[in-house]
Image (cartoon, rainbow, N blue to C red):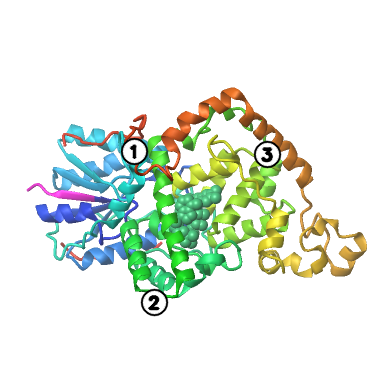
Amino acid sequence: MTHSVVWFKRDLRIHDHLPLAQAAKRGAVTCVYFIEPELWRAPDAATQHYQFIIESLRDLHKQLGTIGLKLNLLVGPAAQCLDRITQTQPFDLLYSHEETGNDLTYARDKAVARWCREHGVIWQQHPQFGVHRGPHNRDHWKAGWQRFCGAPQTPAPERVQASAVSLLDTPPAPSQLGLTEPDRPERQPGGRQSGLHTLHDFLHARSQQYRGGISSPLSAPTACSRLSTYLTYGCLSMREVFQSTEAHVQSLPAGRSRHKQGLQSFVSRLYWHCHFIQKLEDEPALEFRNLHRGYDGLRENDWSKARFDALTTGRTGWPLVDACVAMLAHTGWLNFRMRAMLVSVAAYPLWLHWHPVGHWLARQFLDYEPGIHWSQMQMQSGTTGINVPRIYNPIKQARDHDPDGLFVRQWLPAMRRVPDMWLFEPWRMPQNIQAACGVVVGQDIACPLCDLEIATREAKHKVFGLRANPAVRAAKGAIVKKHGSRKQLDSTPARMSSGATRRKKTAAPASTSTQLSLDL
Ligand SMILES: Cc1cc2nc3c(=O)[nH]c(=O)nc-3n(C[C@H](O)[C@H](O)[C@H](O)COP(=O)(O)OP(=O)(O)OC[C@H]3O[C@@H](n4cnc5c(N)ncnc54)[C@H](O)[C@@H]3O)c2cc1C
């Protein structure tokens, strides 16, 4: 008997899951998740990502149980896992969502497409972020995205015939996968239930603070939606978050314009989420090289390991920067402004290349989404050529967003002993004040590695010098055409993108309730 296989990747839910719904219509179904050791050995992989996924798989297994299915868990390269399934029970259709991941998942997908061709299996992939694969019209992208997000959600099938496949490998411990960094004590828990709870709590309680609350690291943890990780791993679908928000805006009584405006700007960020993934889909190399090649050589051979170590251990000496690093290590999350400030400090006064900093931050962010992450790393480092570099001064940011030092004192215990007067520049404290408050600058609190003003000025000079170079300016147009947002262009005549795409559409020639144990 042939049957269909549904391959779960970063779509760990059964609601609004078109691949599952389509497979269910055909007959018997096998649901699988592969733990692929090669992906976990990559420099952007972290224990916290793994543990979040394991928690989400437990939840997914429960969700599948409600419709008569179970989750099969296999450890190994994807093509080998497919071999094992077909040896147990042959199948002719593989269903999944499209994934715009890192270079390794791209290579893995090509191997899976090859495997499908060789085994006469059709692989059907469906988009889940309104991201286009193959040549597409960038000018009308936003309208397409709105149509995608406004389309009806796909309900979970009611009762599905399970195949006879039952494969349940023991999930390796993180250390067996080479994951050495510890999990984050206060990261968000995995699973759709947690995602739904976060969405409900945001819409019905916290979103009132969205407008005005998302910039300060003090208010952001509750004012922001905190949905990014649930979107990254697909515990919630983009469409359901979009539609729930739109419905909530409609239900708000008249006079709640501030609240409504906040939710509208939240929806525009959902759009950015997908817009950035489209960039990586269209140009996978942006994970490795400057989007604008005119910036090649700017920092590649000219960055200091000592400065990198100071940044990653929270010893830059600028309290707000070091407090952000401490919060990340504890929670795996930071709001947009503080992320942008961290990268700006790394790229300008510390003059670090975005690539090693990007790998380190990918491991810090629980919501690591390659398309957003690498685009943002390059934007904040000034190497896209199409965005005016925005340089954040960490002392000014502290004055504006943490004027009483509550945030830095929460995350840097030594700062609790520093008098208010020296809060923003504690390294300037005279010796006698240091002695009086029991803080030694250079020990309890790091001393800045460079003079912020001078180092930033020198860095700006280098970057803006290149920006003004006629050849660099001339090359900008092609990048805008391929990747730039089209704020005013949604109704202009069609222009085709260059068509250089991440992947071709992979058109290869073309239950039971066993308890799943994912305890580690
Ligand atoms: C250097 C850098 C790296 C980043 N890396 C990631 C990443 O790996 N994954 C990720 O989801 N976000 C990333 N962001 C964007 C943003 O910081 C996070 O989406 C946001 O902080 C997540 O918290 P939230 O869900 O509460 O955000 P909210 O403010 O509630 O935003 C709602 C949703 O909109 C999307 N979003 C918000 N801001 C952006 C943005 N600037 N660009 C694209 N999408 C956005 C996210 O899906 C987010 O969940 C990065 C930003 C920077 C500056």
In the rendered image, residue 46 lying in the magenta stretch gets the answer: no
The kind of residue tagged 2 is Pro
- Nearer the camera: disc 3 or disc 1: 3
Do the CB atoms of the residues marked 2 and 3 lie less than 8 Å apart?
Answer: no
429 displayed left or right of 118: right
Q: CA distance from mark 1 to mark 2?
A: 49 Å
Residue lying at the far right in this picture: please name it. Answer: 432
The percent coordinates of residue 105 (x first, y second) are 37, 41
Q: What's the magenta region?
A: 1-6
Return the disc, 2 or 3, that comes first in the chain's sequence: 2
Labels 2, 3: front one? 2
Residue linked to disc 2 = 253
Identify which residue, 230 or 414, lies in the foreground: 230
Residue 332: where, in percent of width, then height? 53, 59
Is residue 206 visible from the viewing direction of this image? yes
Left or right, 143 with respect to 94, comes to right
User: Residue 148 at x, y = what percent?
Assistant: 28, 51
Q: Is residue 165 visible?
A: no
Which residue type carries mark 3?
A: Trp
**What residue lies at 62% left-to-right and 51% top-to-bottom?**
341
SS label for mark 2: loop
Q: Which residue is mark 1?
A: 108
Q: Label 2, label 3: how many angstroms apart (C-alpha)?
A: 50 Å
Q: Name the residue tied to disc 3.
A: 351
Depth check: give the residue in front, 135 or 195: 135
